[in-house]
Image: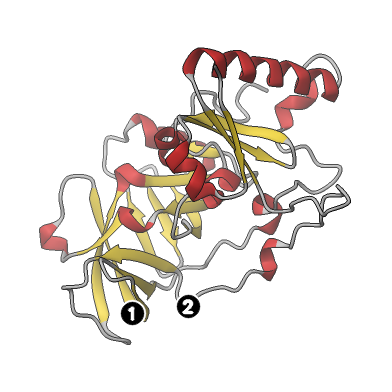
Amino acid sequence: VTTVYVTHDQSEAMSLGDRVAVLRGGVLQQVGTPRTVYSLPENVFVAAFIGTPRINLLRGLVRAPLDGAMTVSLGKQFLRLPEPLSLDHQLLRVQQGREVIVGLRSEAVRIAKPSAARPGEVPLTGLVEHLEFQGHEVLVHFDTGSRAAVVPELEAPRPAPGRPAVRRRRREGGTVLDRLRERAGALRAHSARTGAVATLDGPGRPDPAGTPSAPAPASAEPRLPGDLIVRTTPDIRLRHGMQVPLLVDLAHLFVFDQHGQRICPRPDRLPGLEE
């Protein structure tokens, strides 16, 4: 028996579903185990929708000089990528000189001095702006001099009308309805083989009359202080205004292109290159 679990609560689905299907305006964005969807989101929408606290999204600029190491600039600071580039980082060369969206979950950054860096960690510094005491942990809001990536057109529950979410869909055969039927059939067959599927969609629940309510624009959400939220333990004593050394684990670095598609870690299908 296949159990399809439909919910608007991502935390509930992540704990109850064996497999999660993320929908955006009724269009399938990604399907996989909760661990895969969390650790390898296909696009900005999935990355922002899954996970608490919300993923840090920052504006970045890729710099790949011929005579130096590749870096991702984050305003006043930068992330230096180790040489030789890993497979996950090689696709960033295509983005040389372009603005990208950098995603860092709260556990991808830790409070530690550069001398304590492990392989694959690079330094940043942050100014403490706000502390959220959660009992078993503390969420620290830092100002790193970066620019938050405010991209409501990529995070909204429904794509902007008249613009396809992924450009390659225009060249696939059949009508939009045909393609949706094929995807729905494939998803049902897949779930029948693997077990329960939790289906997630963005906000915008139907009203009692059955008409979907208009989703609130992403830009209307209140923004918290700072540009980077880091998860840490309560025993670390911090105060507002303190300058703190940070280490970023590049193994947990997400980079998305200007269309919101993931380019790091390396996707299974390379965006834009199949054209």
Relative placement, left or right, of 48 versus 162 is left
Relative placement, left or right, of 63 versus 106 is right
Q: Position of residue 261 (x, y in %)?
A: 58, 39
Q: Position of residue 86 (x, y in %)?
A: 32, 33
Q: Which residue occupies the foreground of this view, 144 or 77?
A: 144
Disc 2 on helix, strand or loop? loop
Amino acid type for the residue under numbered disc 1: Val
Q: Position of residue 97 (x, y in %)?
A: 53, 50
Residue 138 drawn above or below residue 184: below
The residue at 49%/47% (across/down) is 12
Instruction: Quadrant for residue 220, please give it.
Output: bottom right
Q: Position of residue 120 (x, y in %)?
A: 23, 45
Question: Badge 2: few (under 14), some or many (20 or more) residues near its Cα, within 10 Å?
Answer: some
The residue at 39%/73% (across/down) is 141
Relative placement, left or right, of 130 versus 209 is left
The residue under label 2 is: 225
Q: Which residue occupies the foreground of this view, 232 or 137?
A: 137
The residue at 21%/72% (across/down) is 234
The residue under label 1 is: 128
